[in-house]
Amino acid sequence: MNDRPLHIVDVFAERPYAGNQLAVVSDARGLAPEAMQAIAREMNFSETSFVLDREPGPQGFAVRIFTPAREVPFAGHPTLGTAWVIRETLGVAAHGGVTLALAAGSIPVAFERDGQGVELLWMRQRSPEFGPTVDARELAPVLGIAAADFDPGFPVRRVSTGLPFWIAPLASLDAVRRCRVDLPAYEAFVGPRDTQSIFVFARQAERPENQLHARMFSPYYGVTEDPATGSANGCLAAYLVEHGVLGGRSVDVRVEQGHEMGRPSLLYLRAGRDAGSIEVRVGGRVIPVARGILV
């Protein structure tokens, strides 16, 4: 294998060594998919991304994303982290943003600064697709909690903005903290279904400046738990609007995730209806922590 630049960044992080780790191979030209999967398994982060070209094509920069177990068509923190690495390493004039051409489609990423001058990256996700609901009593044993721990006012529902999740509203922060995946129950639950990832949230938070607390579990993809899940939070944003969870036709909230793993993460969600469809944006910080060479 030719020497290839490798970058490690923390995404949705407020400081180094928090948020969700991402490895980015910024020059993956000529790499076979089997080699990409092997590298992702070696990195053993939730995802590793691979930039396939040095210049953007008609749909943006071609990028592939792998978990330790398999390739995924879309994932949130790799989208933001890879866009940041492309801007920093490929000499891209990012005043117009960076667009990634993923298997799920083109995802634009914008670079903005908040009122304190902190840079946030924002991705506009695909329009959400809302699927079936399931009875909370089916999901409760998968998470090691009781059916009474679910919020009775809203359904457990499949939502996708490029990658599907079961969005599960829980009644309290304590219920979210107590979740523990039972693997036999998990396998029985996801086996006959086309959606393998479970995202739980509560309308409470550890920090007063945040509005929601969340966790994501996906053993099928080799990710027992994820510190920060941009794709799932995009689905959550759409779910909040569709079901009026917070009231109104739009949301602008901060979601904390990863606290139970010792990797606190912060995700910014904005979503609202526009001509009948729901537009979803997910934002957060990207902090570089390491760079090197794959040999």
Image: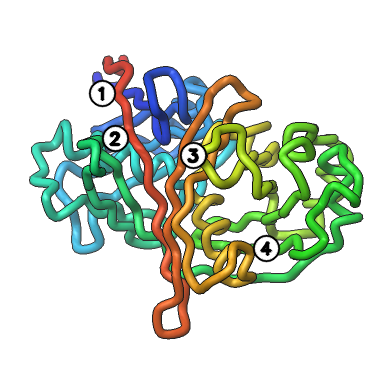
Q: Quadrant of residue 59?
A: bottom left
Q: Is residue 210 left or right of residue 82?
A: right
Mark 2 lies on residue: 28
Q: Pick whichever of labels 2 and 4 is earlier in the sequence.
A: 2
Q: Pick whichever of labels 2 and 3 is earlier in the sequence.
A: 2
Mark 4 lies on residue: 158
Three-letter amino acid code at the position of disc 3: Glu
Q: Residue at x 57, y 36 (%)?
A: 257
171 w.r.t. 68: above or below: below
Give the SS element for disc 1: strand
Q: Is residue 252 left or right of residue 171?
A: left
73 w.r.t. 65: above or below: below
Q: Nearer the viewer, mark 2 or mark 4?
A: 4
Is residue 61 visible in the rendered image? The answer is yes
Where is residue 56 drawn, in percent x and y? Answer: 18, 52
Mark 3 lies on residue: 209
Q: Residue at x 65, y 26 (%)?
A: 260
Q: Which quadrant is the C terminus positioned in? A: top left
Q: Pick whichever of labels 3 and 1 is earlier in the sequence.
A: 1
Neighbor class of circle 1 (other Cα within 10 Å; few <14, some 14-19, many 20+) is some
**Residues at marks 3 and 1, CA–CA distance in whole angstroms:** 41 Å
